[in-house]
Amino acid sequence: MAALSEHAIEEIRALPPRFPHIRSAVLPALDVAQDELGYLTREAMTEVAELLDLDPGYVEGVATFYTLLHLEPIGKHHFYVCTNLSCDLRGAYEICDHIKRRIGVEGFGEVSADGLFSLEEVECLGACEFAPMMRYQRRYHYDLTPEKVDALIEAARQNGGDRAADSPRDAAAASQKPPGRRASSRGPTKEDSAELNA
Amino acid sequence: MPDNVRPQSGDSRRDLRGSYGPARHHLLTSLFGIEGLHTLSVYRDRGGYSSLRKAMFEMAPEDITAEVKASGLRGRGGAGFPTGTKWGFIPKGVPGPKYVVVNGDEAEPGTTKDRYIMENSPHMLLEGILIACYAIGAHQAWIYLRGEYDGPFGMLMAAIAELRAEGILGDRPLERDYPLDIQIYRGHGAYICGEETALLESLEGKRAQPRARPPFPAVKGAWGRPTLINNVETLSNVPWIVAHGGAEYAKFGLGTAKGTRLVSVSGNVQNPGVFEIELGTSFREVIMEMAGGPPPGRRMKAFWPGGCSAPVLPEWGLDVSTDLDEVARAGSMAGSGGVIVMDDSHCMVRAARRLLQFYAHESCGKCTPCRVGGNWALRTYDRVLEGQGSEVELGTFDAIQESLQNGRCLCALGDSAGFVIASTMKHFRSEYEEHCLEHRCSVEEQVVAASA
């Protein structure tokens, strides 16, 4: 028991009563772990399994199924760019190429040398009338242009080291500002997410 | 132009690109655009929650279901199943909990209407959910919201908190002894969760793989209990139907399908957006008028009428109406109402490849034809697009699309992948032949020549 902080463990322990069955807590629990560590290590998944009285293999099996859970390190700033048809028809791959050049990576999933950035090609995010678009820092960014992307990257470089946690965290937990080593304190909060799209 | 189109919404918190404001057929969107509509006070000032009050104080649960049946409302998630009939399947008088589960996993490519509803009027959805709970005898609803929808999540959370504070949710909603509660469960990025039984598996903390039916969710759904699963848009129609009656709702619609629906138009159009239309409106009106048609100098080549899982239609499809049955007769599906438009500067083989990448990635892996077929098709497309195609690949595409369809899988994902291959080959075979046999793409040649 060392992968997760006391705070995270407490948060995970508080999850099961919210559901008719303890197993439903597994995905919210993985969110807690991922927001703390940046991605899901095997140790973290094992610890989640122990806290929820599940088999570690089961938890890993669930984690591998879902796009928003990462089993490899990602950049502190991670861009989820939609490249499905509606966005593709409006230049999504050009936007991806531009981002790759700007952050200095060759392909999707690669983390930039400074650890700041990564880029993921995702399927339709349900905002096709604003194509091309992406999800970044728990927000949708619409009508992407190279200039808009440059501004976001520049802003991220300016405020540097903080990781922008972006798991789909659940309910009350998402708005808490925990002490300690969780790096999401500057990430958007519930209040932010109500205010869409800067 | 029948709809109010605001191409750019400036500094509005909720971006509106599509229908809003009053129009004869704006049942869902008539209040959209009003400042503060997402708050309980503004929604209530405009008559919000009077339908819930009417349902709980003036109607018996079975009367509500009867009104929904009379409305002719069909599910707006994609399958188009009659909503009232679905409500009627929920067993009565069984001990223990029942659930209403709201499918807010909107992930069908091209489909954005549920987000449009939730960002504009979260209380309209919540009111529909509560009426559905009361009608089927449930006390607990779960909204399964796709994980990427951070904006709608924040708005729904705020709206639910308002309802709790005002006593509309809780042990005695509207001072009546009928406890009601709504919880949100966030998805984690998996298209398959839009399939109702996969959604239930995910809600239960499992890999989201569809279940074999029977038992149907109405009998054995979430956590083994009777469960009603409806799409966000479907439930958002319920307050209007309760307020005005099913018969009034059924007066809308120009074909056999009743009412209005939201269509989201995207891709190569000048005015992409979400438009509320009467069912039966032609795709020509939707694409060429409301959405402004293709960009200047371009010609519409094809469109997917109901999300990318609906077989593609070429230009003649513009004269098909949005009536669910008529789209089916034209060889496609009205599906989720996501209309993706492609103009003549894009290669159909390349588009089909991108869609197969989607189906290959999103296959849950449970059924062999889908698990294997999607990736096999993708590899074949890659070979063809790299100029390595031949007669053999044309046959391979045919074999794969056939093996994906016709009920060989538990859910429709495999069929949908098959539809993409089959329908693009049917209507644009010459492009496939060019790529496979001549190793060239005349569409791209034209684009290059024009820009030279």
Image (cartoon, helix red, strand yellow):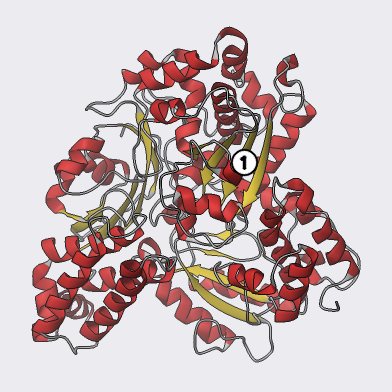
| Rendering coords of residue B424 (x, y %) | 18, 64
In this view, B183 is above or below B148: above
Residue furthest top in the image: B58
* Residue B226 location, quadrant: top right
Camera sees residue B114: yes
| Rendering coords of residue B24 (x, y %) | 37, 21
- Quadrant position of the C terminus of chain B in the picture: bottom left
- Quadrant position of the N terminus of chain B in the picture: top left
In this rendered view, identify the residue nearer to me: B261 or B407. Answer: B407
In this view, B312 is above or below A117: above
Instruction: Give the residue type at disc 1.
Output: Trp
| Rendering coords of residue B22 (x, y %) | 44, 25
User: Image check: B69 left or right of B319?
Assistant: right
* Residue A93 location, quadrant: bottom left
Chain bearing mark 1: B
In this rendered view, identify the residue nearer to me: B389 or B343. Answer: B389
Residue in the image at 49% along x and 25% along y: B238
**SS at badge 1:** strand
In this view, B391 is above or below B364: below
| Rendering coords of residue B322 (x, y %) | 25, 38
User: Image check: A124 left or right of A175?
Assistant: left
Residue in the image at 38% along x and 21% along y: B69
From the image, tell me which residue sits under label 1: B142
